[in-house]
């Protein structure tokens, strides 16, 4: 009760006295807070959804053998200049050297959630008279599932990869007229094998669904002529945004090629960054408007309350007390506006979830207002309320009491 | 027994807009002593410097040149915080336009100085405020807002507020200037009663010679100088 008792009481009474003015500015702050909270929740939901969709079907970091390079015919002698034209070598399918030993090393790295070897190459899928160019992927199903969550993407059948079995993309199955249990021939440049379809999957991207055939690691090694090999080792990390840093670290320490999801999706990353920057800009502009709104109302209030300020000063209120009376008013307006605004944002989020739906009748993506975000926005708005009050409060505190009373 | 005056002003000058083309000196060397327990009327025509002098005595304005001792302590040279603390402790104010805070009830207006000083109002302080409001005849209006009270009643609340911290000196600037004759008499009688009951010193600025004649001492200011400073006799009082 004692702490800021005088300032609190006077501030609240001043606000109650200017009822309409106070109400309007609180609603204004609430609108600002609601926009900030809603936009933050919306963009967070949108980005999480985009990332989930994009990264759901690909590793966060992919490791491959270094490219074959052309070895110079002769050492360059000192003091000579060699003019040469080098044709870049065609890159054959190569295995990541020593990949079996590499896997436990990678698994021990902090931040790494899963590691999966893969043999991938191109081939043809044949059924009857139909044929389709495919991307053949040989995997260890358990490990691969932890990278892309394959089992959750099954639309028909049961994901299983015993020798002679395959999992096929949904569109490819449609193109070849395949159903679960049917057989198809997989052909590569050097070999071919008949496999039975155990499951159809939807990887989230049509083009991937049209090309993907997943077989056991060993089958792919045989089909692609890489016995005992793995063309890539894929990693999933716990925090997707840490992938780049982990990739850099690996690049420094190990003699392989590393590609992070940020590098393979550079456009997406820059789009997400642009989106984040735009959101920050909108939030900043709204905050500035909120601050100006609170400040303008308090400036008017200082003018209106000149006489009262004078009498308070005559009675012995210090400059600090008068200053704090107005700072508290800013804080109260900010806090009340925040509470109302967070409530409003919550309603907007609920409306979005309820009414905005895709063609399939399902919500477009998950959007929620976590308490931490609500608290953060409310705290920022309250602090802004105090900041907005600084200039008017200083003006009130600097008022000459004799002059203020005379008015 | 100490003979030190409560207020001791020496050669007080006040110049507005010092150094500017419109510089104007409104007080020209005022010497004034007020003893504890006195009830003084400060009179004079408009523009004679009464209010300026009262503001200087009330530590609301600084003099340009001169000395001012309040309860024996020199006020010249104190910073704003020092002056504020002495206003809070030693002075009560009653203004012409009542100057109550409209958002607070009568009782809250009277307890405001305590709230200001300590951040809270104790039960004892609230009781004291109620007693004061009772003694000014407002026990039925404790929870009324100033807008619900007549001018005379508002001024009584202001008087109670000026006295609540038991200051040794109350300064009143035209306390009846905004009231009709009957209310004006009531308020003045109340001021005198408070003076008699509590021994508080009063300096009252007034235009009204009838009220001036009912004070103990009459100081007249003309053109920023004291033109007369005399005790009021019974004969003076009966003339008006």
Image (tube, coloured by chain):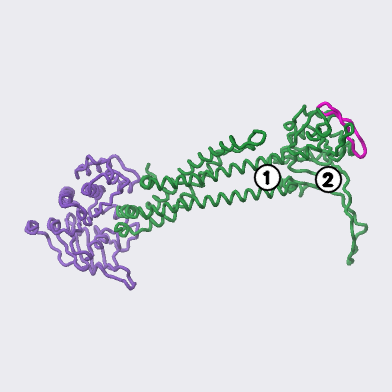
Viewer-closest of A12 and A94: A12
User: Magenta stretch: dominant SS?
Assistant: strand
Mark 2–mark 1 Cα distance, whole angstroms, equals: 24 Å
- Which quadrant holds residue A206? top right
Give the letter of the purple chain: B
At horizontal 22% and vertical 60% (from top left) the residue drawn is B7
Answer whether residue A163 is visible to the viewer in this image.
no
Give the letter of the green chain: A
In this picture, which residue range is highlighted in magenta?
A180-197
At horizontal 77% and vertical 43% (from top left) the residue drawn is A62
Indicate whether A354 appears above or below B202: above
Measuring from the top left, give residue B31's x and y in whole percent: 21, 66
- Which quadrant holds residue A113? top right
**Local crowd size for mark 1, using a 10 Å CA cut-off: few (<14), some (14–19), many (≥20):** few
Q: Which disc is residue A65 wearing?
A: 2
Q: Could you tell me which chain the residue with mark 2 belongs to? A: A
Locate the C terminus of chain B and report the quarter of the image it occupies: bottom left
């Amino acid at each position: 009760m004692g702490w800021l008792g005088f300032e609190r009481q006077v501030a609240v009474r001043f606000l109650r006295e200017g009822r309409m003015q106070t109400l309007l500015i609180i609603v204004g702050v609430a609108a600002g807070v609601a926009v900030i909270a809603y936009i933050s929740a919306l963009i967070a939901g949108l980005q999480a959804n985009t990332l989930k969709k994009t990264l759901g079907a690909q590793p966060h970091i992919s490791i491959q053998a270094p490219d074959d390079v052309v070895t110079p015919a002769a050492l360059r002698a000192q003091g000579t200049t060699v003019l040469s034209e080098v044709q870049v070598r065609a890159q054959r399918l190569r295995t990541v050297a020593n990949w079996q030993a590499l896997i436990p090393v990678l698994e021990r790295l902090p931040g790494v959630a899963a590691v999966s070897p893969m043999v991938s190459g191109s081939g043809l899928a044949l059924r009857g008279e139909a044929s389709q160019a495919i991307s053949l992927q040989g995997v260890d199903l358990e490990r691969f599932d932890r990278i892309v969550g394959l089992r959750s993407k099954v639309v028909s059948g049961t994901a299983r990869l015993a020798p002679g079995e395959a999992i096929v993309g949904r569109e490819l199955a449609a193109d070849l007229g395949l159903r679960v249990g049917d057989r198809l021939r997989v052909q590569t440049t050097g070999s071919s094998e008949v496999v039975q379809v155990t499951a159809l999957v939807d990887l989230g991207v049509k083009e991937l669904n049209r090309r993907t055939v997943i077989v056991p690691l060993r089958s792919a090694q045989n089909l692609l002529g890489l016995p005992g090999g793995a063309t890539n080792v894929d990693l999933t990390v716990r925090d997707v945004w840490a992938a780049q840093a982990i990739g850099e670290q690996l690049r420094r320490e190990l003699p392989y090629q590393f590609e992070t999801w940020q590098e393979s999706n550079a456009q997406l990353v820059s789009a997400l960054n642009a989106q984040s920057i735009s959101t920050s800009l909108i939030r900043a502009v709204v905050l500035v408007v909120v601050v100006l709104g609170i400040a303008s109302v308090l400036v008017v209030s200082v003018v209106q309350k000149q006489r009262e300020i004078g009498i308070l000063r005559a009675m012995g209120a210090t400059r600090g007390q008068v200053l704090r009376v107005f700072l508290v008013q800013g804080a109260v307006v900010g806090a009340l506006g925040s509470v109302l605004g967070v409530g409003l944002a919550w309603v907007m989020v609920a409306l979005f979830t309820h009414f905005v739906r895709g063609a399939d009748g399902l919500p477009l993506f998950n959007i929620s207002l976590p308490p931490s975000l609500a608290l953060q926005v409310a705290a920022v708005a309250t602090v802004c309320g105090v900041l907005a009050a600084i200039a008017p409060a200083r003006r009130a505190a600097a008022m000459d009491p004799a002059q203020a009373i005379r008015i | 027994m100490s003979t030190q005056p409560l207020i001791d002003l020496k050669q007080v000058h006040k110049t507005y807009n010092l150094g500017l083309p419109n510089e104007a000196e409104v007080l020209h060397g005022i010497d004034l002593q007020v003893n504890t327990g006195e009830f003084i009327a400060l009179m004079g025509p408009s523009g004679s410097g009464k209010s300026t002098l009262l503001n200087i005595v009330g530590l609301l304005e600084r003099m340009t040149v001169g000395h001012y001792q309040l309860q024996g302590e020199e006020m010249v040279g104190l910073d704003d915080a020092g002056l504020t603390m002495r206003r809070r402790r030693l002075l009560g104010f009653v203004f012409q336009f009542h100057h109550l805070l409209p958002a607070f009830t009568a009782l809250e207006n009277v307890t405001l100085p305590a709230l200001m000083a300590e951040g809270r109002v104790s039960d004892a302080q609230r009781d004291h405020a109620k007693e004061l409001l009772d003694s000014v005849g407002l026990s039925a209006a404790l929870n009324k807002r100033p807008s619900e009270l007549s001018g005379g009643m508002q001024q009584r609340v202001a008087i109670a507020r000026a006295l609540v911290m038991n200051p040794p000196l109350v300064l009143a600037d035209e306390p009846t200037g905004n009231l009709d004759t009957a209310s004006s008499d009531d308020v003045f009688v109340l001021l005198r009663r408070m003076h008699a009951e509590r021994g508080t010193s009063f300096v009252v600025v007034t235009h009204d010679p009838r009220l001036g004649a009912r004070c103990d001492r009459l100081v007249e200011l003309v053109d920023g100088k004291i033109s007369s400073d005399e005790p009021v006799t019974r004969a003076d009082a009966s003339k008006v």
